[in-house]
Amino acid sequence: MKKFITLITYILLIITTFIIPINSSIFTLNMSNIVETDQADEPFIVQPNTIVLTKLDNPDDLFTFAIDSSKKLTDRERAQLTFTGTLTDYLKNAHALTLEDFNYEIEDSAQRVIYHIKSLKKQRAFTSEDLSISVALMDETLQLDTYLFTAADALKPNGMTDQSVTAALVPIYYNSDRDVQYPVYTKLKAGKNSFRRIINTLANTPNYPGIVERTQFPYISYVWYSAGTLELKMLSSELTEFSDPTVAENTLKCLLNTVKDFSGDLVVNKVSLIIDETKSSLAFGNIAIDEPFTVDRNPQVYLPLLQNGQLTWLPKDITSRETADETIKQIIIAYQHPYGVCKCSEISPLLAKTVELEQANVVGNTLRLSFNNALAEYCKDHTDYPATLIEGLALSATTLPDIDSIELYIGETKLNKLGNYAFDNPILRPLYFNVDLNYIK
């Protein structure tokens, strides 16, 4: 039996080895038929959304920027946009802003969003401000620093002619609670001569409704004029309200300014004060009155004082230069940076910082002023702003010696229109301005 089993084993071995060859490939799993291998052997990566902020040039907008995305922006991604701004006015006051402080429009597509920042929602009649805007989204940031000047037609010039008033008027200076003085054209009170009429008017100045109350002025017992000097005598018993130095100084300034601008036949160069027939001034704010006070006729810039919805021209002295060219440049600078001339928050710039006076020269009694094209751009589509600007320039320039008119140019082109405002060139000083409301037709 043992031999039989051995024989059968040999027979099976011969059959499996030589008679039926075994194909081993049928037992091999070819993985290449299931997954094709990557020859570079790189791992599979999901690409994140790529976002880019871009500033766009658009002359119709204050600021334009785009958000470009490699994929469709999600609401969450859009919500991550931060928009901040800082507005610094000419008084150096800084104001924080958000996107909601601006008027803006949005162009929206699947992978691009464009923000058109049009303007500020709140604007004054005249603004001169530096604007800094920062836009941030994820790791991208845009920064813009720009300058804004708004010249709205909300305020109108107040110059008038004989046809616009009911009487012949003279400028009487007022003291205001803003520590500034400005003239109001009003009718002179009765008196036996022109100087007594001035004194009587100063002592009984009418209120200027909505702007200022009457200016205090003492009783003058004696008025005398001789060789350019106006002599005034006062009684100490009438000066109880003027013992305070500030009150006395403001009263004196009011007097000197009024006689300076008074267009009578006799020019006042000095004012002499006498109290109780002496030169003692204890009763009048202890101001030294031993020498006459000189009437200052330095050039002036007329600044726009904005209050109660109307404009009042405020004259302020400027430094006189050797030439009219250099002096008028001081006036232009004051219109661009008025705070350097008068620390009064109600005064706004009248000219943008980008407006340049390219040339100024005198021809006869006319001052020719040539500006760059920025002046025309700011006056574009406006009527009252260029009219107000021209009136201010005429008032200021004619305070220069021997100047009685101005001409305006853009480059070499003589102007007879700015924006929507047409005018005669040369331009004369307004006959009246800051007119008492009681004498306007």
Image: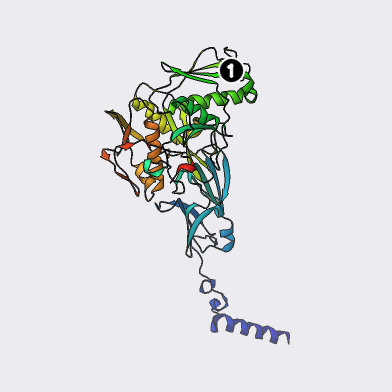
Give the labeled residue for mark 1. Answer: 287
- List the single residue furthest toward the right: 1
In the image, taking residue 417 as reference, residue 228 lies left or right, namely right
On the question of residue 324 being in view, the answer is yes
In the image, taking residue 1 as reference, residue 328 lies left or right, namely left
Quarter of the picture containing the N terminus is bottom right
- List the single residue furthest toward the front: 192
Q: Residue 186: x percent and y percent? A: 47, 36
Q: Residue 290: x percent and y percent? A: 54, 12
Q: In front here: 353 or 30?
A: 353
Q: Residue at x 34, y 23 (%)?
A: 323
In the image, taking residue 375 as reference, residue 293 lies left or right, namely right
Q: Residue at x 46, y 39 (%)?
A: 435
Crowding around mark 1 (Cα neighbors within 10 Å: few <14, some 14 to 19, many 20+) is: some
Q: Residue 432: x percent and y percent? A: 41, 37
Type of the residue with mark 1 = Ile
Q: In front here: 370 or 158?
A: 158
- Disc 1 secondary structure class: loop
210 lies above or below 40? above
On the question of residue 374 being in view, the answer is no
Please name the colour scheme applied to the rendered image: rainbow
210 lies above or below 264? below
Q: Residue at x 37, y 48 (%)?
A: 380
Q: Residue at x 26, y 40 (%)?
A: 413
Q: Residue 418: x percent and y percent? A: 34, 45
Query: Which quadrant holds residue 227?
Result: top left
In the image, taking residue 385 as reference, residue 137 lies left or right, namely right
Query: Which quadrant holds residue 236?
Result: top right
Q: In front here: 350 or 312?
A: 312
